[in-house]
């Protein structure tokens, strides 16, 4: 997957090509997603899913009541449940299922880390640095294993007015990073709610940033915008992605302050 970015008269653009549960009476519960122990990314929403059985027979999750404690003082309900951690660390996730007067609980540990989210500097503008990653459920087709993780994507940068191209010779000259994607891993969406997310970080020591516009490279359809902080020093955010292959990221300057005359 690649991402491409360029600046349309603004700044620049980039091309970015469980643990078993305890049983109470005849009811048994286990956390089955994410597969554990997973490594999650900060601020990345992840789906938690549990399974329940009674006397060895699988139960319909919709027939039970579910309560979650995500280990960071946040609670949730339902099954599946979605949650994002705002800080790195190791968290103990607890789920409790109720079927009538019978309850059962399960626990699992999740590790949330900042990962290798280190923005790389633009060779033609050292004040700017960029990181683009893709987070979601990844499957290793060689081993059959799966886990929720964030993988850095390759990025090429283009100057305003330059023709954006993914031709090998042009891409090679414009690529600003060289991520080593894990061998054998491919994105997998187990259900429509489990979409891939793009994580974009842009930093500017000259504090010129306004936002980053993400579009489909081929159709031009807008997929989302991530705003910079008030100082114009950093963009850091995630957007849900469709099943596209090439993305264009346009790094835009913040509006100039109006001139005040006496």
Image (tube, grey):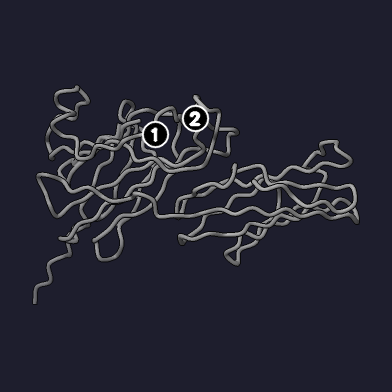
Residue 156 relative to residue 34: left or right:
left
Which residue is depicted at the point 26% across and 50% down? 119
Residue 84 relative to residue 130: left or right:
right
Residue reaching furthest front? 143
Does the residue at mark 1 contact the one at mark 2 (Cβ under 8 Å)? yes
Q: Please identify the quarter of the rendering in which residue 56 is found.
A: top right
Inter-mark Cα distance, 1 to 2: 9 Å
Residue 5: x and y, percent? 24, 38
Residue 62: x and y, percent? 78, 43
At mark 2, the secondary structure is strand
Residue 163: x and y, percent? 15, 29
Q: Is residue 29 above or below residue 196?
A: below
Q: Please identify the quarter of the rendering in which residue 246 is found.
A: top left
Mark 1 and mark 2 lie on one chain; the one further toward the N terminus is: 2
For disc 2, the neighbor class at 10 Å (few under 14, some 14 to 19, many from 20) is: some
Residue 126: x and y, percent? 12, 51
Q: Which residue in the protein does label 1 denote?
A: 182
Which residue is depicted at the point 32% across and 43% down? 132
Q: Which residue in the protein does label 2 denote?
A: 140
Q: Is residue 169 above or below residue 248?
A: above
For disc 1, the neighbor class at 10 Å (few under 14, some 14 to 19, many from 20) is: few
């Amino acid at each position: 997957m690649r991402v491409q970015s360029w600046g349309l008269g603004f700044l620049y653009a980039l091309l970015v090509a469980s643990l078993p549960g305890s049983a109470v009476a005849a009811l048994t519960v286990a956390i089955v997603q994410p597969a554990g122990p997973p490594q999650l990314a900060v601020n990345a929403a992840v789906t938690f899913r549990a399974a329940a059985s009674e006397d060895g027979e699988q139960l319909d999750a919709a027939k039970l009541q579910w309560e979650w404690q995500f280990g960071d003082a946040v609670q949730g309900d339902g099954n599946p449940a979605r949650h994002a951690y705002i800080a790195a660390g190791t968290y103990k996730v607890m789920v409790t299922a109720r079927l009538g007067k019978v309850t059962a609980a399960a626990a699992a540990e999740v590790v949330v880390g900042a990962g290798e989210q280190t923005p790389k500097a633009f060779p033609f503008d050292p004040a700017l640095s960029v990181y683009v990653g893709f987070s979601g459920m990844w499957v290793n087709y060689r081993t059959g294993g799966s886990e929720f993780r964030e993988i850095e994507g390759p990025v090429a940068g283009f100057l305003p007015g330059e023709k954006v191209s993914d031709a090998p010779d042009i891409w090679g000259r414009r690529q600003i990073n060289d991520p080593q994607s894990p061998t054998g891993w491919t994105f997998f969406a187990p259900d429509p709610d489990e979409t891939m997310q793009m994580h974009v970080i842009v930093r500017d020591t000259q504090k010129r940033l306004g936002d980053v516009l993400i579009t489909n490279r081929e159709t031009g359809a807008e997929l989302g915008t991530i705003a910079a902080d008030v100082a114009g020093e950093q963009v850091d955010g995630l957007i849900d992605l469709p099943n596209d292959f090439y993305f264009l990221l346009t790094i835009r300057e913040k509006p100039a302050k109006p001139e005040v005359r006496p």
